[in-house]
Each structure stands twice: as structure tokens, then as C-alpha cells.
Amino acid sequence: MSTRTTDITITPLTIPTSVDSADAGDFLEMVRVRNLVYREIDGDDDGAYTPAELLPHYGEDPNEIRFIWAIRRDGEIIGRAGLDLPLEGDSKIAYWLVEILREHHGQGIGTTAYELVERTAREHGRTVLQSWAAHPDAPGRRLAAPTGYGEIPRTTRPGSTYATVTDWSRSSARAPST
């Protein structure tokens, strides 16, 4: 499954058997870009991992199905999208991420990647999408948590606040029946 937006392509990432494999190039580049994204968000390399450290997390797992896509502009990896589907009974949950280098923000690329994530989740009967985003502290206006506990900076970019988490089971926007 591929999605195309002008010069942007989103394609499944090949997971090599080893970081030394002949087919490891895209995985190595994905990890490099992933680390750059976290540096842009956090301002440091605390979230950086080596390809050898990340590779085991992409191996087969009897407890979940993992999708990982490379987001490319003109053939160069500029980000990634991912979807994890827990295999727990009748789970309706899917965990997702979309990470794109800052210089490519604001061009609809993340929206296109999220649409692929959402479509794939629906195709697998998932109705609850959950994610996590870093929100580094910043001066200015604050956004209070609806629970009354905590707050985050009300910014338009760092961590690209994806506050639109969809729970089709409790909203008027329902996932299609399968």
C-alpha cells in the first residue's frame, strides 16, 4: 500500500534481518531521520538510538502487528509513520505515530500520512487510535489539560500537537463496518 502526494511517497519500510544486511539502507536512514526529528523536538540527543538498538523492536511479535512506512520527498526519507495493532482478544486499540522533519511541516504531508494510518487501522477493525507527543516547555500561552491536571505550551509546532485523537466508538464519526 502506497500513498502519493505530489513529490511525496509513503511506502512500507523494509525491515532488515541485520543492520549489516544488504537491504538495511532504508532502515538505517529511517533511524537517522527519526533521531533528527527527536533532536528537533527535544533540543538534545537523549531520545537517539542506534539502528542496532531499534531493530529488535521491528521484528515479528506474536502480541502485535506493526506497520512502518517511510515518508519520502524526491526519494529521500523525511519521516516515518507507524501503526501498532495489539493482538489482545477483541482489542479495538491502535497506537500510531507520524514523525516528519520540521522543514517539511505545514505542507499536508503529516495529514496524508495520518490518513494512511487511520485507513489501515479501520481496515483492521480498530476504532480507537492512541498516540503520544512530546511537548517541550515554551514561553507564552498555555493549554490546560481537560482533566484539570497539568498544562502544555499552546504552540503550533514542536511535537506537532495531534490533539485530534479519534475514538469512533464514542463519536458521531463511526468507523465503517466490516
Image (tube, rainbow, N blue to C red):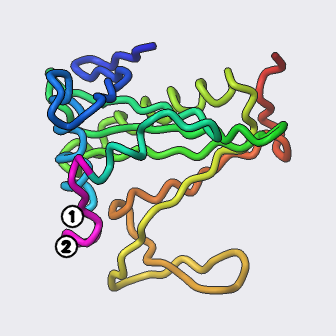
Residue 121 appears in which quarter of the rendering?
Answer: top right
Distance between the alpha carbons at the discs numbered 2 and 1: 5 Å
Q: Which mark is residue 39?
A: 1
Q: Which mark is residue 44?
A: 2
Residue under the point 73% across and 78% down = 147
Looking at the rendered structure, the kind of residue marked 2 is Asp
Pick whichever of labels 2 and 1 is earlier in the sequence: 1
> Percent position (x, y) of residue 44?
19, 73
* Left or right, residue 22 beside residue 148: left
> Percent position (x, y) of residue 155?
39, 69
Looking at the rendered structure, the kind of residue marked 1 is Arg
Residue under the point 84% across and 37% down = 90
SS of the residue under disc 2: loop
Tag 2 near tag 1, CB within 8 Å? yes
Residue 45 appears in which quarter of the rendering?
Answer: bottom left
Local packing at callout 1 (Cα closer than 10 Å; few below 14, some 14-19, many 20+) is some
Q: Which mark is residue 94?
A: none
Residue under the point 46% across and 38% down = 82
* Left or right, residue 46 beside residue 131: left
Residue 34 vs 137, above or below: the answer is: above
Image quadrant in which the N terminus is located:
top left
Q: Main secondary structure of the magenta part?
A: loop
Image quadrant in which the C terminus is located:
top right
Local packing at callout 2 (Cα closer than 10 Å; few below 14, some 14-19, many 20+) is few
SS of the residue under disc 1: helix
Residue 65 vs 146, above or below: the answer is: above
Q: Is residue 137 magenta?
A: no
- Of the pair 107 and 48, the residue shown nearer to us: 48
Residue under the point 33% across and 20% down = 5
Q: Which residues are magenta?
A: 41-52
- Of the pair 143 and 116, the residue shown nearer to us: 116
